[in-house]
Image (cartoon, rainbow, N blue to C red):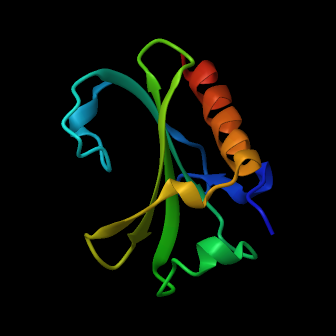
Amino acid sequence: MKITKESIIGVGQDTSLVNIGWLRPNTPYTNDGIQKDIDSVEFEICVNGIEKLEQCIQTDAEYMMCFVHFDAGTEDVEGVYLSVWDDEDDTDRSIDASILDEDERKVIVEYALAELKEYR
């Protein structure tokens, strides 16, 4: 099974979290030191039935988060980032977003862009 729009469940099964005008080095998973303003949309992805994501989850307390960064004030995607979060621990693990195929990345970016436009 692949990631679909139905796989996206927002943050805490509610809505996405949108951040406008973040300084990029202060955001998770971008440790390359590049300083630029970004707009960010973050949300949870339900991993049920998506084998490549299920394999990343090790305990019942873990879940998959996705972060889509846009160049500030634009619709230009700066990056897509995945991470496993744990309700019982302060740590998280970055997952290489290259596990996404082109169709999955498109679904994720379209969702994030719609959320960003609604927020703006």
Is residue 20 visible in the rendered structure shown here?
no
Answer above or below: position of 59 versus 38: below
Q: Quadrant of residue 39?
A: top left
Q: Quadrant of the N terminus?
A: bottom right
Answer above or below: position of 94 versus 112: below
Nearer to us in this view, 13 or 30: 30
Residue reaching furthest to the left: 33
Q: Quadrant of the C terminus?
A: top right
Nearer to us in this view, 109 or 61: 109
Horizontal and vertical percent position of residue 108: 66, 43
- Residue at left offset 23%, top offset 41%: 32
Horizontal and vertical percent position of residue 109: 64, 36
Residue reaching furthest to the top: 73
Horizontal and vertical percent position of residue 20: 39, 23
Is residue 17 visible in the rendered structure shown here?
yes
- Residue at left offset 28%, top offset 31%: 24
Answer above or below: position of 5 versus 62: above
Horizontal and vertical percent position of residue 62: 46, 76
- Residue at left offset 41%, top offset 68%: 85
